[in-house]
Image (cartoon, helix red, strand yellow):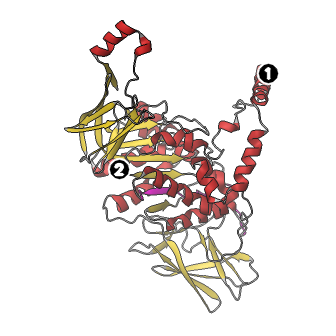
């Protein structure tokens, strides 16, 4: 980004000194050299100037003018442009200066958000070294938003767009990069990726405080946080840091032990990440969002049924871009494999994620076959990205491919067994992985006690579930565990979505803070 001073301004400096200067017209860092503007739609451009100052924005033959408002902010909308890999220049001119942004491409822009599994770098994945070596993609542009947690909305962040090279891709979101590189190769248009993920973040941290307050369902959660914050002082935090430094000097901390963090500015506090990470990007023209989060909310999985849809609808309202695509990754398999059916917070969180598919223009990548029981950060991000890409290619780019995992549709009790019907089935129908018969099913009678069940595929989209010890079954569950041993899928290798047919009380229903 080049900022040019006018001769008149330089003369003013010499004649009158700095006290007489007016502010320069500026843009936030989401606009910068090497950026990608979303094709085929109007794109907002905004910034700051002196109140009442005229601002002119030009690109590729377009010219737009506006006047800065009383608070010094200005905004224009660029006319829609077709995809182009020919570098363009965006010029923004005010009374005293001109900002010139070069190497601007027009293509597809996606936001990559969530917690650590979205933040997880390409260098730490399986085949990461190979992907990095091949990451020379001049048409792919990357930008990362630094971790800033705040209760005050931030207008800017310390970041810059970069062309995709092995060096810039190395520490970028693996899921984001792999997703974007496939979009680029499939469509042959430039791709811009905005990484604003933060490891360990809770969903409520990505939602504005006033939205959580207005909803009415998060009073206890907010109150609990307010009490914690009120009881914690700067002096208390300074004492903890000093103690840590003393322990470190004495060689007492364990390997990789971190200095105390101030939870008041961390990634769990409600609204912190909305204000510090998301707010500076709101309104930037884009196609949609890919999201990988949920682990930090598993203990409050029942609450996630309302919280996750609230997050999505709030982002859509604030972006003013309609119901843009929002695709997420369901929780992977994790922790111990249990041989007997039992309650599971992770299963309930997956259920909440699946229920959010009721919102328009959403999609879910099911990955219960791609996790690692001993590691909450599965290294296989290629499978994750490929399943997200299926959703985008099918829903947004006109490809005729299967994109959704099979989902439970209905059940019928007959002769001591339950026939389960699925929808979103590929043309070849259901199949199993590794062993012949489906695994992962449990069945229960009116006593609400689940036992492992036998299952067999009885049609393209049906499975018959039964157990010799449950003579009058009323409910079925599938892959209902932290780390389910389940193998039902379609012929594309897309796993059947975990489900339950009962609506018996969830174990997390009372966990609200």
Q: Residue at x 66, y 50 (%)?
A: 374
Overall secondary structure of the magenta stretch?
loop
Asked if the stretch drawn in magenta spans residue 390, the answer is: no
How many residues crowd mark 1 within 10 Å: few (<14), some (14–19), many (20+)? few
Give coordinates of residue 253: x percent, y percent: 77, 28
Furthest toward the top, the residue is 14
Query: Judging from the image, what secondary structure is the residue with disc 1 in?
Result: helix
Comes first in the chain, label 1 or label 2 = 2
Give coordinates of residue 497: x percent, y percent: 54, 67
Q: Relative to residue 15, is residue 474 drawn left or right?
A: right
How far apart in space, not on screen, are marks 1 and 2 (Cα)? Answer: 50 Å
**In this picture, is 359 found above or below 163?**
below
Query: Judging from the image, what secondary structure is the residue with disc 2 in?
Result: helix
From the viewer's side, name the closer residue of 282 and 341.
282
Identify the residue position indicated by label 2 in the image: 183
**In this picture, is 429 found above or below 350?**
below
Give coordinates of residue 140: x percent, y percent: 34, 40
Magenta residue span: 323-340
Determine if residue 281 is in view. Answer: yes
Q: Quadrant of residue 72?
A: top left
Give coordinates of residue 64: x percent, y percent: 26, 39
Please identify the quadrant where the N terminus is shown: top left
């Amino acid at each position: 980004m080049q900022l040019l001073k006018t001769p008149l301004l330089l003369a003013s400096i010499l004649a009158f000194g700095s006290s007489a200067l007016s502010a320069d017209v500026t843009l936030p860092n989401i606009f910068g050299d090497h950026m990608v503007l979303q094709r085929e739609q109007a794109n907002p451009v905004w910034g700051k100037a002196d109140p009442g100052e005229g601002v002119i924005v030009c690109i590729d033959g377009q010219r737009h003018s506006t006047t800065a408002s009383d608070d010094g902010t200005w905004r224009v909308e660029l006319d829609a442009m077709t995809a182009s890999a020919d570098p363009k220049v965006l010029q923004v001119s005010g009374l005293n200066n001109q900002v010139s942004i070069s190497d601007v491409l027009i293509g597809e822009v996606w936001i990559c958000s969530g917690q650590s599994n979205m933040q997880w770098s390409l260098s730490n994945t399986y085949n990461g070294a190979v992907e990095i070596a091949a990451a020379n993609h001049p048409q792919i542009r990357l930008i990362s938003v630094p971790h800033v947690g705040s209760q005050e909305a931030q207008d800017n962040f310390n970041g810059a767009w970069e062309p995709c090279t092995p060096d810039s891709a190395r520490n970028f979101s693996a899921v984001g990069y792999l997703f974007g590189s496939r979009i680029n190769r499939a469509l042959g248009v430039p791709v811009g990726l905005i990484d604003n993920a933060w490891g360990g973040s809770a969903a409520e941290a990505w939602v504005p405080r006033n939205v959580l307050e207005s909803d009415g369902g998060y009073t206890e959660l907010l109150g609990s946080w307010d009490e914690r914050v009120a009881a914690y002082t700067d002096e208390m935090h300074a004492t903890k840091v000093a103690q840590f430094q003393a322990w470190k000097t004495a060689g007492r901390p364990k390997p990789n032990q971190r200095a105390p963090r101030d939870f008041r500015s961390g990634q769990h506090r409600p609204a912190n990440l909305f204000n510090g990470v998301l707010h500076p990007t709101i309104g930037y023209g884009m196609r949609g969002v890919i999201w990988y989060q949920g682990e930090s909310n598993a203990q409050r999985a029942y609450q996630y049924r309302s919280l996750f849809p609230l997050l999505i609808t709030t982002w859509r309202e604030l972006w003013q871009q309609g119901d843009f695509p929002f695709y997420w990754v369901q929780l992977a398999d994790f922790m111990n494999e249990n041989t007997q059916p039992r309650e599971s917070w992770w299963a309930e969180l997956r259920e909440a994620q699946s229920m959010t598919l009721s919102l328009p223009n959403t999609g879910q990548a099911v990955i219960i076959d791609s996790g690692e029981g001993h590691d909450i950060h599965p290294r296989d991000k290629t499978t994750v990205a490929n399943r997200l890409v299926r959703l985008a290619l099918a829903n947004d780019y006109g490809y005729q491919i299967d994109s959704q995992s099979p989902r439970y549709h209905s059940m019928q009790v007959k002769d001591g067994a339950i026939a389960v019907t699925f929808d979103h089935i590929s043309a070849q129908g259901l199949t199993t992985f590794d062993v012949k018969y489906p695994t992962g099913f449990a069945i229960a009678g009116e006593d609400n006690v689940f036992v492992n069940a036998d299952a067999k595929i009885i049609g393209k989209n049906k499975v018959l579930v039964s157990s010799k010890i449950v003579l009058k079954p009323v409910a079925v569950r599938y892959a209902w565990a932290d780390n389910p041993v389940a193998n039902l899928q379609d012929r594309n290798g897309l796993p059947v979505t975990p489900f339950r047919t009962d609506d018996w009380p969830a174990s997390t229903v009372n966990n609200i803070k």
